[in-house]
Image (cartoon, rainbow, N blue to C red):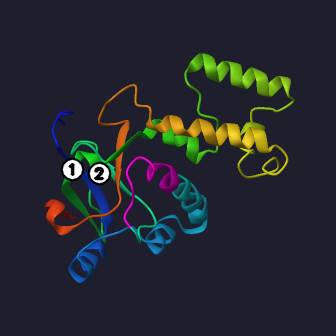
Amino acid sequence: MEKNSEKVTIWTRQDIRSLDDLKKNGVFRTKREYIEEQYGDIAEHYIKLYRWFTEVASKRVPKPDGVEFPIWCSISYDSMLRPTIDTVCYELEVDRSQVIYFDGGKWDYVLNHRYLPKDKEDDRKYLEEMRRKGFNEIDIYSFIEGKYSYLYPLEKKRVMDSWMRIFEIENWNIYTVQANIWEIRPEMIKNIMHYDK
């Protein structure tokens, strides 16, 4: 991907019903029901974090009215999720200004409700401070949800504030860097890949 280009190519795997949405509405947007179907019993965990992401990402790239959740994309054909039964993969050409880039490795800290350190030294200091405060290595995952979520609002805020570092990309590569957009419109689609046994 050329960093100076005004258009970028990205890829995303979506439910096959997205084709119907595009045909019927002229736009595809991620639906809560798709997230619930994909994640089942743990869907609410993802939905809460996607809402957080939506809130902070919309300050970087304003989201259109009616959009509830972002569309997760890969920045490379080599790293994209391949089509499976009942899904399709879109190859999209999108204005760079409409893409929200973030570090997918750092996103794992968000998924795990964990403080996202600046670097190894910051992580070491954070863990040391938590031990001094009487928290063990399991406790530090409980400030957002769990036994400490209502007891330590400052720790909860500290963890959530650290998550903003997902947008700080130190190592730009096709396996770590991910992209989000708010919607897919027909004019963005360069190719649609279907499942092939």
Q: Nearer the viewer, residue 135 or 102?
A: 102
Highlighted magenta segment, given as a residue range: 53-64
Q: Is residue 10 above or below residue 132?
A: below
> Toward which corner of the image does residue 65 lie, by quadrant?
bottom left
- State the image coordinates of residue 129 (x, y, percent, origin top left): 77, 23
> Toward which corner of the image does residue 86 lie, by quadrant?
bottom left
Q: Residues within 10 Å of mark 1 (few under 14, many from 20)?
A: few
Residue to which mark 2 is pinned: 98
Q: Is residue 63 magenta?
A: yes
- State the image coordinates of residue 145 (x, y, percent, origin top left): 73, 52
Q: Residue at x 21, y 33 (%)?
A: 3
Q: Residue at x 14, y 64 (%)?
A: 187
Q: Is residue 119 magenta?
A: no
**Structural distance between the alpha carbons of marks 1 and 2:** 6 Å
Q: What is the number of callouts on the image?
A: 2
Q: Is residue 168 left or right of residue 81?
A: right
Residue 95 disc label? 1
Furthest residue toward left:
190
- State the image coordinates of residue 92 (x, y, percent, origin top left): 19, 55
Tell me the SS state at disc 2.
helix
Q: Is residue 94 left or right of residue 15?
A: left
Q: Is residue 136 above or below residue 57?
A: above
Give the position of the C terminus as an image quadrant.
bottom left
Tell me the SS state at disc 1.
strand
User: In the image, what residue type sits under mark 2?
Assistant: Gln
- State the image coordinates of residue 146 (x, y, percent, origin top left): 77, 52
Does the residue at mark 1 contact the one at mark 2 (Cβ under 8 Å)?
yes
Q: Is residue 153 left or right of residue 194?
A: right
Q: Is residue 131 visible?
A: yes
Q: Residue at x 23, y 49 (%)?
A: 10
